[in-house]
Structure formats: structure tokens, C-alpha cells
Amino acid sequence: MKMNKHRSEPGGLSGVTMTGELFYTLAHELKQPLTAILSNAQAALHFLPQDNPALDEVRDILKDIINENKRASEVINRLHLLLGKKEIQHLPVDINELVQEVLALINGDLANGQIIVNTSLTPNLPAVIGDGVLLQQVLLNLLLNGCNASVENDCLEDRQLHIQTRQNGDSVQVSVTDQGQGIALNNMDYIFEPFFTTRSQGMGLGLAVCRTIINAHNGHLWATNNTDCGASFYFTLPTYQREST
């Protein structure tokens, strides 16, 4: 079996919009491990000057520093991968594995926001065809948006995200549902436009980049308000078809 790798440069994918959003998102990811490294280092310094330093605590702190350093390194490595891409790879991607990988990446954000994630991942899904690094970025952006919507809830029980994967004909569908305030009806037609944002510190690029990536994969991305509260974002991707030999 021979797997395809097609050269593709969809509009905006490698331009200023894409680069700006990647820097913004990855800088956000780096903030948490770097803050944790600083806090742990300060804690270690607090223990050491004592007459009988708590070496077990210091040892645990140093392990935490190593783990957070590894996480920061992974973020930087992904930045290199994303910005160094000159072509989109069209290869088999296990979407359920992708979900688990991204959840591990934002574990710190989920913990800090006291956000509960519920997953409904259909087993034995067919692989989708695409570029795992870019598709990871799509899911990452959607989940970070969900986190931002969730932390607006004062009631911790309402800080929940739901991720679902399922087969939809010749495609695999992924949904990310939050219990936030939802999308204002007059904004629904603009949320995927570049530089449109309702957040004071937002750049308005995340969803535009998501749409560009999904379109480049011959998929579809859309959003709806839930009947009770919050919003859901969906995207579909074609399943990978083996080539006849």
C-alpha cells in the first residue's frame, strides 16, 4: 500500500494569520508550565535553608520541575513543526488518539479552571485522512475556547466540556460542547471570520485558522447553540481510503 502526500498551500494557512494565531495559542500553553516551574523552584529554595531540609519534598519538587520543563519543550517542538510545514500530509490519523493527546496537553488549563471533561469516543472508528499536527491544533483551539466559556460559570458543576467522536457516513465527526453563555445570534455569522472576537484579550484568529485547516482537509466546521445552554462546535473529516494496489 502506498500512502499519498499531497503538496497543498490553502489560502492563509502559512501566512500571517496562521503564524499569529499559532504564536498566541502556544504562548498560552507555555505560560502554565513556566509558571509551575517558577513556583516549584521558589518552593525548593524555601525548604533548603532549614537546619533539617525536607529533602523528600525537594525531591518531589524537582521531579515536578522536570515534568513541566518537558511539557514546555513539547510545546516549543510543536511550534517548530507547525511553522516549518511547507505541505499538508494526507495520512491516516486516529481521531480518538488525537483527542487523548490534546487533553493531555491542556491538563493544566483544565485543572486550573476546575473543568470536568466528559468523553464519548466511539471505538473502532475508521482513520481520517489528514495532517495530525494541524488537526491537533484545530482540536486544541476548540477545547481552549470551551475552557474560556466554561470558566465564566460561577457554579463549578456547570464547568463541563463534552467531547464526542462518531462516524457520519464516509466521514468522522468530532464535537466539542460547553455549558457557557452560548454564541450571540448576531455573532453566529461572523465567528469564523479573521479578527472577529468577543474577548477583550482575544485576537480573533483561532476559529478562522480552524476553518482554514478543516477546509484544507476537505472537511466541514460549524457551530450551534445548545437548546439548554452553551454552544457546540463540530467538524467532519473524510475517512482514509486504502488505495488499490
Image: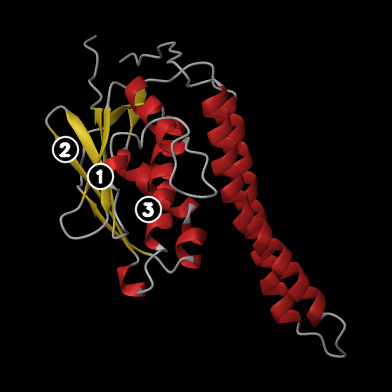
Image location of residue 194, percent across then percent down: 45, 30
Task: Name the mark on residue 185.
Answer: 1
Q: How far apart are the alpha carbons under marks 3 and 1?
A: 18 Å
Question: In this figure, what is the number of numbered marks?
Answer: 3
* Element at label 1: helix
**Where does the N terminus fall, quadrant-wise?**
top left
**Would you call the spot at circle 2 few (<14 residues within 10 Å), some (14-19), or many (20 or more)?**
some
Residue with the mark numbered 3: 146
Measuring 83% from the left and 90% from the top, which residue is drawn there? 52
Q: How far apart are the alpha carbons under marks 1 and 2?
A: 29 Å
Task: Name the mark on residue 98.
Answer: none
* Element at label 2: strand
Up the image or down, 164 lies above or below 245; here it is below
| Between discs 1 and 2, the one toward the N terminus | 2
What residue occupies the far front of the structure in this picture? Answer: 186
Up the image or down, 103 lies above or below 24; here it is below
Task: Find residue 211 and report its image quarter.
Answer: top left
Task: Find residue 60 and report its image quarter.
Answer: bottom right
Is 51 on the left or on the right of 164, as rendered? right
What kind of residue is marked 2?
Gln
Measuring 30% from the left and 69% from the top, which residue is drawn there? 158
What residue occupies the far left of the structure in this picture? Answer: 169
Q: Are marks 1 and 2 in contact (CB under 8 Å)?
A: no
| Between discs 3 and 1, the one toward the N terminus | 3
Residue with the mark numbered 2: 167
What kind of residue is marked 3?
Gly
Q: How far apart are the alpha carbons under marks 2 and 3?
A: 23 Å
What kind of residue is marked 1?
Leu
Image location of residue 85, percent across then percent down: 54, 21
Q: Is residue 175 visible?
A: no
